[in-house]
Amino acid sequence: MKYINRHNRQRQGNSPILWLLLLLLCLSACSSDKGEIPVQPTKATKLYVYVYAPKPAQPTRATYDGDVNTIINENAVYSLKIWVFGHTKHTLLGYYASTQPSSLSTSEPYELIQMTIDETFAETEAASREHVDVYVAANVANSNCNVELDGQMTQAQLEAALIQKTTVDPFGVTAPVSVVPEHVGLPMSGVVRNLSVTGSAPVLRLDNGSGDIARVQLIRTVSKLRFAFSRQTGGETLRVNSIKLNTEMLPIAEYIFMSETEPYNRQRCHIKTDSGYETATPNLLNEAVTEIAENEDPVIYAWGYDEATPEVYEARIETAVANGSLTQKYFYFRESDKLITGEIKYQVGDGDEQTATFTMVDDGTDDGFSRNHVWTIYSYLAEAKLKLIVAEVAPWKQTETNYEFYNW
């Protein structure tokens, strides 16, 4: 009886070890059955950053604040970089880079980025964490902006980063960009400052100050200028020989990121004025436009014809181009605080070359030739009795039924 009791005590003493061995054998067997090795959880803390696609470009016509749609590739995001800095100490806390096409290029309005954040910062109690500044750059590369941003950038360097005139003059007049750079896209940026970071390791998120998830809105850093042409069916031919902006129109440099004291709005440009302005006036056209589309009633494509909103008007122009009723040329430029002016040289039939001048609606003190905006200049010929349309700034409502020159 004593032997049995002693044996029972021995079994009880070894029981935890036996159970541990059995547990390990079981786990091993389970892993072997699946052909997998259990993955150890990562210790890296992730900061969730919601990056939103750029909003539709804003029109600059009178006091209308609506939006107009983008064409193919104007929204496309091919590369994305994110920097997170401490708001007070300006120390880099996290960096993210991807050269894979973003889901922002599809119908998704935003993309959730999970980026690794500094562990010391992450382990600090939420109430004691330093607020952060977040910078996001999309499609900003040497190939389209002549600037390379990387993970070694300081916050001061990002604040000073420029798209500027160089030998290839990105988004300027000497080498005008007339199409969205293929597989590179239009440069975009977004910045949010002085945000708190909530949550606990391994998942943190930005707070917008009201308890909701903060988001970074991408904004195109360039403006689009559209020239649209048409003539009446059966009328004289129209040939556009050149399109030029006047001198001192575009600044040599503009900031990629908007400054803290001047956040984005439709009245403000973010240029480096002490860099000076373009002194050249090269022809924006690579060659003359000899085939101008014709239609039965060119006036219906003039702004103000039926009080259409900018979005409706934009769609009308694009539809007309698609069906061959209008001829158009796009140009993407650096923003400017100047009242943009220029000239179009043209010929009607076999006549002599003539010149029409154009002027944008507002200068930089009000609307400016600022980023993420669209301007349209529509020119048309109606009947052979006119040699060219009258070039003038159109008011909100059309002042004459025929032969007007519109911009917005």
Image (cartoon, helix red, strand yellow):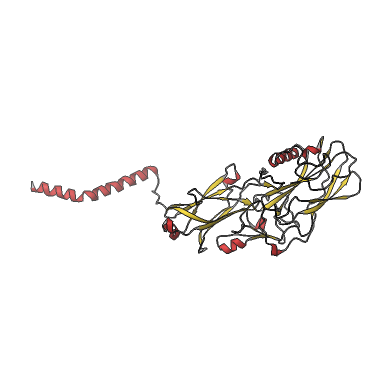
Task: Kindly give the residue lying farthest to the top in the view shown.
Answer: 296
Residue 151 image point, x, y percent = 55, 60
In the image, 349: left or right of 301?
right
Q: Residue at x 82, y 49 (%)?
A: 288
Q: How many marks?
A: 0
Does residue 153 appear in this view?
A: no
Image quadrant assignment for residue 81? bottom right
Residue 229 image point, x, y percent = 80, 43
Q: Would you place residue 102 above or below residue 275 in this image?
A: above
Q: Nearer the viewer, residue 203 or 310?
A: 310
Residue 25 image point, x, y percent = 30, 47
Image quadrant assignment for residue 263? bottom right
Q: Nearer the viewer, residue 159 or 153?
A: 159
Q: Nearer the viewer, residue 72 or 227?
A: 227
Residue 324 image point, x, y percent = 77, 38
Does residue 34 appear in this view?
A: yes
Q: Nearer the viewer, residue 307 or 252?
A: 307
